Amino acid sequence: MRFVLVALLLNLWAADSRQLPTTQSTGLAPGKVVVCYVSSWAVYRQEGGKFTIEDLDPQLCTHLVYAFAGLDAENSVIKSLDPYNDLDDNYGKGNYKKMTALKHKYPHLTTTLAIGGWNEGSAKYSALAADPAKRKIFVESVIQLLSKHGFNGLDLDWEYPAKRGGAPEDKANFVSLIKELKTELNKKGWILTAAIGAGKDTIERAYDLPQISANLDFIHLMTYDFHGSWDQKVGANAPQTSADPNDELTVEYSVDYLLSHGVAPEKLVMGIPAYGRTFVLRNPESKEVKIGDPTAETGFPGPVTKENGFMGYNEICAELGKDSSWERWWDNATKTAFARKAEKVISFDDANSIDEKVKLAMRKNLAGMMVWSVDTDDFRGECHQEQPYPILRAIGKSMAASIEEIEKQKEPSAAVQTVSVPFTLLICMLLLHWNH
């Protein structure tokens, strides 16, 4: 009897000494990724928009992705798209190595090189993926380039297989390319990721989801650009949900579609845009603006990025901060921030919409969040004297809070334990005393 009671006491003491896992209140959330894309051409922006590797804050990211390298279609090899900026040959700036060197100071970092992007098109990637001999040459060139410059892996940004000049066979050939790359990258201990489109039509035509999930380390889902001035009506750039329950152009729909078609949640990374989409109203006299109001074919540009229909978050927050005539509102159906001044309308993500998206991702146990791109966050902290990188900081804060909240939901059983264990210990001690 005494032996049984002693054993019970020891087991209860061990159970009582266990603690629930805790999360950090600030900084990176343990076990989750924050993938930060850096657009290399941002170095050529004027005024306060010029962005260099020195402007990065690696403490806010787990992964840095240098965008973009390109494809030399004639020789089937990966190549720098801007040798002077990327390489250190011939007195170049050497930004490839500047980024990868950050790992010495920030050993938690993984640095990868992205190949592709919208401007690279699809046709030459389609031709490469269709030819086993070309794929072999390409894979060898990737290993050589990554080794030379110190990258930890490759990010495939083919936009998009089976579209924009691609072929139906791209869907299967993309898997072959991924498998062959993964085999060689694994030998080096490097990772392979891919950025994929979020529209249902693109997903169905371009990706064998179970296969790419099985062979990629992470899938970066580009959950933005659902709407823009090309629709010729006001819309949300990255709507989380919609007033229409059948709307397929939302973040939640895209995420759920992937998860229900073979993508493992621990490999899926949800994209967050550090930019907004702009619109010019056809009826600027209207007192109220709502989603669906008609607009011109082209949106207005930001003063620094200078792209029609696009404004970086740094441009948006600066504009709203200096001009009080902008009227801001929140659209609860899409969980999106909007601003309007006369004929101009901006759809963008702010701390509130980011918090909603992060909560969704954490509830679904996704791998983490991805940002396109950090060079249009307020990286100088010039808006309202905020800290630099409010978008990245909002992601980190929301991730930590969401994980903590999820852990708290597990606490009722722990709370019962904290009451019952001491009480049971007391009973056992009394029994031992009585037995003695």
Image (cartoon, rainbow, N blue to C red):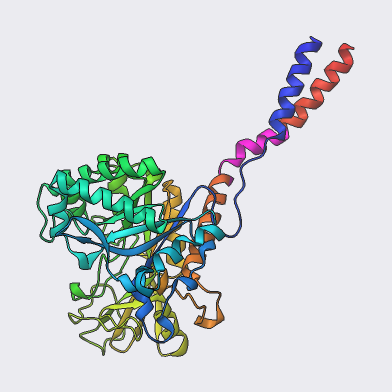
Q: Is residue 184 left or right of residue 58?
A: left
Q: Main secondary structure of the magenta part?
A: helix
Say if the magenta span includes residue 388: no
Image quarter for residue 79? bottom left
Above or below, 272 against 377 in this view is above
> If the image is split into quadrants, where does the N terminus sit?
top right
Residue lying at 35% horizontally and 83% vertically, measured from the top left: 340
State which region is magenta: 408-419
Residue lying at the far front of the rendered structure: 90
Where residue 229 sits in the image (x, y, percent)? 22, 76
Where residue 417 sits in the image (x, y, percent)? 67, 33
Residue 12 appears in the figure: yes
Say if the magenta span includes residue 417: yes
Of residue 418 and residue 273, the one placed in the foreground of this image is 273
Residue lying at 29% horizontally and 42% vertically, measured from the top left: 260
Residue lying at the far top of the rendered structure: 1
> If the image is split into quadrants, where does the C terminus sit?
top right
Image quarter for residue 228? bottom left
Of residue 309 and residue 305, the one placed in the foreground of this image is 305
Where residue 53 sits in the image (x, y, percent)? 45, 70
Where residue 374 sits in the image (x, y, percent)? 42, 69
Q: Is residue 221 left or right of residue 121?
A: right
Above or below, 67 against 436 in this view is below
Of residue 379 and residue 131, the one placed in the foreground of this image is 131
Residue lying at 64% horizontally and 37% vertically, measured from the top left: 414
Residue 338 appears in the figure: no
Q: How many marks?
A: 0
Above or below, 430 against 236 in this view is above
